[in-house]
Image (cartoon, grey):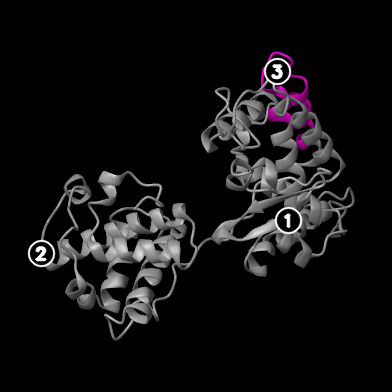
Amino acid sequence: MAVLTMNSDEYKTFPAILREYAEYTVAIKGNSEKTVCEYLLDLRTFFRFMIMKWEDLELTMDEFEKLSIKRIGVEDVRRVTQKNIIEYLIFAGFKRENSASTRMRKLSALRSFFKYAHVKEHIIDVNPTADVDAPKKASTLPKFLTVEEAVKLIDTVRSDKESKTRIRDFAIIVLFLNTGIRLSELVGLNLENIDSDITMIKVMGKGAKERIVYLNKAARAAMIEYLKQRLDPKHVRTSSNAVFLSGRENRISNKTVQWMVQKYLKMAGLGARGLSVHKLRHTAATLMYQSGKVDIRVLKDMLGHEQLNTTQIYTHVVDRNIEQAVENNPLADVVLKKK
């Protein structure tokens, strides 16, 4: 299947029923290729577990990873019970040491597939995932840069006179920090996605959903400067319509952007913070919400979140900052002394 970003030889190792599910999920439901590929890999692990269980096999993890699922068909799908789903999640947690978030993703893959088998293909009468509780994920606050750290990162890129891609890299960093754009959205930008005044860009978000991202003064200035170079035939000779290009004048890759961000985080003395490209998106969202001038529902639309509860984590970040501010009050240690 050409639309999936998976090696064709590997794709052929999946049984027909999973390939049909993948094609339906991409073409009809509009799920991203990346998500569907991850779901396929999770489903492969599940059916390897089921084959091991059905055939009473004792396998090492290396042997388990080599187990073929090509034989899986409709009758095998019908054999799966709710108990099997729970047993698999226990196996994933204890035997494979998968985190709660990883097990949640695996359950999402199973729910998606068995809903397809139940509702769309009608090959099962009962969805075995229907009443399975999701693994509880520990609540963690997103990592982000403070205003001072973000300015330091921007200044580090601006000052890197030795870099041949400084103007491009500056525009990318500024976009991340000012708009909260996703990595995939930035990499997928085409020239026609930018309006003539360079005040807004159209991005393709998760689930193939388009949205408009507005550029503030800083982001617009950085993009104008970069586009002068990008559209100058003396500098760029490619026919590609990608906005951001690699050194070879191809569309820039996710890995190149990630490498570039890590390089400048280290140069700015922020490399030990466990930060990433996605944390720059968190930074944009957090700083906008902390300003007190952005409603949480507006922020939800700006970030392209499907559900409001996804965005509400940024309200918890602010709550934690308030708690820390109270603790840092110089009067915090002044207590009534016992006589």
| Mark 2 vs mark 3, CA separation in Å | 67 Å
Q: Amino acid at mark 2?
A: Asp
Neighbourhood count class around disc 2 (C-alpha, 10 Å): few under 14, some 14–19, many 20 upward: few
- The kind of residue tagged 1 is Ile
Label 3: which secondary element: loop
Q: Identify the amino acid type marked 3.
A: Lys
Q: Which residues are magenta?
A: 149-170
**Residue occupying image coordinates x 86% and y 53%:** 291
Q: Compute the Cα span from label 1 to label 3.
A: 31 Å
Query: Which percent across, then down, holds residue 56?
Result: 10, 64
CB contact under 8 Å: marks 2 and 1: no
Nearer-N-terminus badge (2/3): 2
Residue 113 position within the rendered picture, expressed as x and y whole percent measured from the top left = 36, 69
Q: Along the horizontal axis of the image, is 305 left or right of 319?
A: left
- Would you name the residue on which mark 2 appears? 56
Give the residue at mark 1.
212
Helix, strand or loop status at disc 2:
loop
Q: Which residue is mark 3?
A: 234
